[in-house]
Image (cartoon, helix red, strand yellow):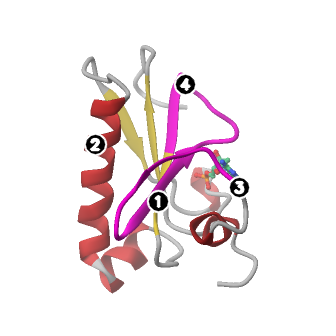
Amino acid sequence: MAECVFCAIVSGDVPADVVHKSERTVAFRDVNAQAPTHVLVVPRRHEPDLAALSAAAPEDVAAIGTAVADIAAAEGLGEGYRVVFNTGAGAGQTVFHCHAHLLGGRRLEWPPG
Ligand code: DGP
């Protein structure tokens, strides 16, 4: 999709610190990290949010889960980690290409802000 920064990262047109790739996903470190590990897992397919991705390509949702597990293991997040899909501007979503935030490496409080 034109002018989508995550599509540009998936295609390699915009550089990123890529930590994991699969047939369906690409994962890279968030430019504005909120934890020692803060990785974004994105489907190669452009859909605006988790609901749209689930409807269009449920296998991509499973692939995100698999990528999260692989990255968490590689990053040594055995103590626990958090996976967040901000959905909609009211929840803080700023990039409208579905993505999972994988956060870990520090104590994570609940409830979130
Ligand atoms: P959200 O607010 O849930 O839509 O999360 C978008 C995240 O994407 C935000 O934490 C910052 C990150 N981000 C935005 N643009 C770029 C970029 O060009 N490169 C990287 N690595 N991260 C980006």
**Which dot marks residue 15?**
3
**Which dot marks residue 35?**
4
Residue type for callout 2: Asp
Residue at the disc numbered 1:
26
> Which structural element holds mark 4?
loop
> What's the CA distance linking mark 4 and mark 2?
18 Å
Determine crowd level at label 3: few under 14, some 14-19, many 20+ residues with C-alpha closer than 10 A: few
Q: Which sits earlier in the primary sequence, circle 1 or circle 2? A: 1
> Which structural element holds mark 1?
strand
In the drawing, does residue 104 fall left or right of residue 16?
left
> What's the CA distance linking mark 4 and mark 3?
21 Å
The quadrant holding residue 71 is: top left
In the drawing, does residue 88 fall left or right of residue 43?
right
Q: Which sits earlier in the primary sequence, circle 4 or circle 1? A: 1
> Which structural element holds mark 2?
helix
Please name the residue shown 64% across and 60% down the image: 89
Residue type for callout 1: Val
Does the CB distance between marks 4 and 1 fall below 8 Å? no
Quadrant of the rendering where the C terminus is positioned: top right
Residue 50: % across, % down: 41, 67
Residue type for callout 3: Pro
Please name the residue shown 30% across and 66% down the image: 61
Q: Is residue 30 in the magenta section?
A: yes
Residue type for callout 4: Ala
Q: Which sits earlier in the primary sequence, circle 4 or circle 2? A: 4
**Which dot marks residue 70?**
2
> What's the CA distance linking mark 4 and mark 1?
20 Å
Q: Which numbered disc, 4 or 3, marks the residue closer to the eye? A: 3
Q: Which numbered disc, 4 or 1, marks the residue closer to the eye? A: 1
| Stretch in magenta | 15-39
**Which dot marks residue 38?**
none
